[in-house]
Amino acid sequence: MAEIELFSSLQLDAIREVGNIGTGNAATALSGLLSRMIHMDVPKTELVSIYELAEHYGDPMQIVGAVFVRSSGGFQCSLIFIQPEEDANFMVELLLKQQFGTSIPIDEIPQEMIDSALTEVGNIVLSSFLNAINLLLGTQHQISVPGVAHDMLSSILDVVASIYGQMGETALLVNTELSVEGLEEGRRISGHIILIPDPDSLELLLRKLKVM
């Protein structure tokens, strides 16, 4: 079932709803991490070939921050959380302000601390997203130690396709924007979750949703 055109509209709608639920769960967890109310736009969820990821994003030269994890257990999959570098740095500043009680300009924060904070944010987002799926399936999971990277969007997506394409060729993209309580009006934070289920996991999900 690797070819997207083989999915029925009912299957696609069911999978998109899973993406919506997972994103809502992730936003709730992020609110707890930052101790701020977070409002999430209705996410745009698509099912695409892993080799066509670049066609569904913006400027391939844009610098982004990405957090990668691998999940084992009943629902095996790979997950990636990608943000424009500016938004990723802003999330780091918010997290460190919550932890230390004072604002620290991003250019005064050591890179190791930036990566640690970004990893914490990504891990919370992806774990919470995955928790929603496992709750639906009645399965459990173990998540790998997160990896973090800063690079051009095209380079990140090339790595995703070359490494994770060996495990599954279908990717669920979830794109949304967040507004965070207490920020200046109009300040938005974008985030992109990529879920790449192993073939058996995708079939398990469709069976559980009663669309297979």
Image: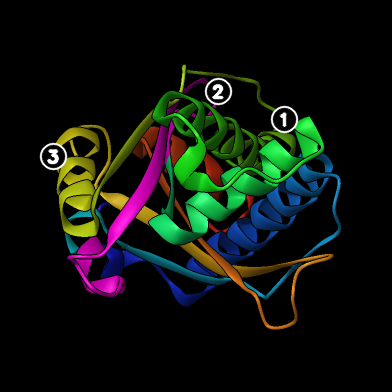
Numbered circle sitting on residue 138: 1
Of the pair 12 and 80, the residue shown nearer to us:
80
Q: Is residue 132 visible?
A: no
- Contact (Cβ within 8 Å) of mark 2 with mark 1: yes
Q: Amino acid at mark 2?
A: Gly
Q: Residue furthest front?
A: 108
Where residue 78 appears, as percent x and y from the top left, is 39, 35
Please, what secondary structure does the residue beneath circle 1 have?
A: loop
Identify residue for label 2.
Answer: 74
**Residue at point 86%, 45% (across, down):** 35
Is the Cβ of the residue at disc 3 closer than 8 Å to that at disc 1?
no
Note whether residue 135 is visible.
yes
Whichever of callouts 2 and 1 sits on the residue coming sooner in the sequence is 2
Q: What's the mark number on residue 32? A: none
Residue range in magenta is 53-79
Determine the image quadrant of residue 160: top left
Work out whether residue 65 or residue 40 is closer to the camera in this orientation and state it. Answer: 65
Of labels 3 and 1, earlier in sequence is 1
Q: Which residue matches tag 3?
A: 162
* Above/below status of 47 relative to 140: below
Task: Check residue 135 for magenta coloring.
Answer: no
User: Label 1 crowding class (10 Å Cα cut-off): few <14, some 14-19, many 20+?
Assistant: few
Q: Amino acid at mark 3?
A: Ser
Residue 96 % position (x, y): 68, 37
Q: How is the image coloured?
A: rainbow
x, y percent for residue 57: 31, 71
